[in-house]
Amino acid sequence: MIDISFEIEAEGKDEICRIIQGAALAVMEHEGCNKSVNITVVSEDDIRRINRDFRNIDRVTDVLSFPAWDGSLYDISDGFLGDIAICLRRAEEQAQEYGHSLRREIAFLTVHGMLHIFGYDHMTPEDEQVMMPLQNKILEEMGIAR
């Protein structure tokens, strides 16, 4: 189950929910794991606070992921994968900055966040060489090009 909530007012909530749900399901399908995740669309102030409180980084970011597991992903007894926060304003800015649609940016941030939930990372060049092509592959399979 994918629980999507909005901490802010946003135009096109239904479309945003469809994009997020499709992207999250695409990652779960790729990973062969259909469990639950909470995804919240937040303001810049909210994501900055979350980033500061949980990561000690006092700045706005686009997406944050908080996996619920410790150790083996598939040992999650309650079926809960974790939480993701997506900053809608940053998504809007980045879509414009990169010259693509908001749909593409929201899908990208959801896939990116979901991959972190599943344990992928990009902190080292080796990890990045695994995560980024996978991220692009999933988006391409969804029919979402850059």
Image (cartoon, helix red, strand yellow):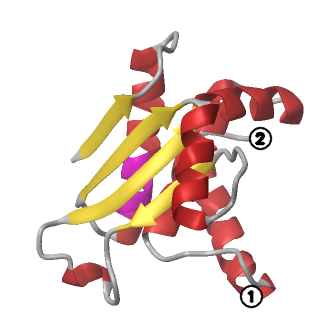
Image point (25%, 81%), residue name: 74
Give the spatial CA distance, label 1 vs label 2: 23 Å
Would you say 135 lies left or right of 146 here? left
Residue 73: x percent and y percent?
A: 32, 80
Question: Which of the two residues, 46 or 15, is positioned nearer the viewer here?
Answer: 46
The verdict on residue 26 being magenta is yes
Asked whether, in this view, residue 68 is left or right of residue 109, the answer is: left
Q: Nearer the viewer, residue 19 or 117?
A: 117
Q: Which residues are magenta?
A: 24-29
Type of amino acid under label 1: Glu
Residue type at the position of mark 2 = Arg
Circle 2 SS class: loop
Q: Could you say where residue 62 lies in the image, as x and y percent from the top left?
A: 66, 44
Q: Note whether 77 is above or below 116 in the view shown.
A: below
Quarter of the picture containing the C terminus is: top right
Q: Is 128 covered by the magenta stretch?
A: no
Location of residue 16 with respect to 62 vertically, above or below: above
Q: Image point 27% across, 40% down: which residue?
A: 3
In the rendered image of this protein, does residue 137 appear above or below residue 23?
below
Percent across and percent down for residue 33 are 28, 67
Q: Magenta segment, principal secondary structure?
A: helix
Q: Which residue is mark 1?
A: 126
Which of the 4 quarters of the picture holds residue 27?
bottom left
Residue 68 location, quadrant? bottom left
Q: Secondary structure at mark 1?
A: helix
The mark lying in front, picked from 1 and 2, is 1
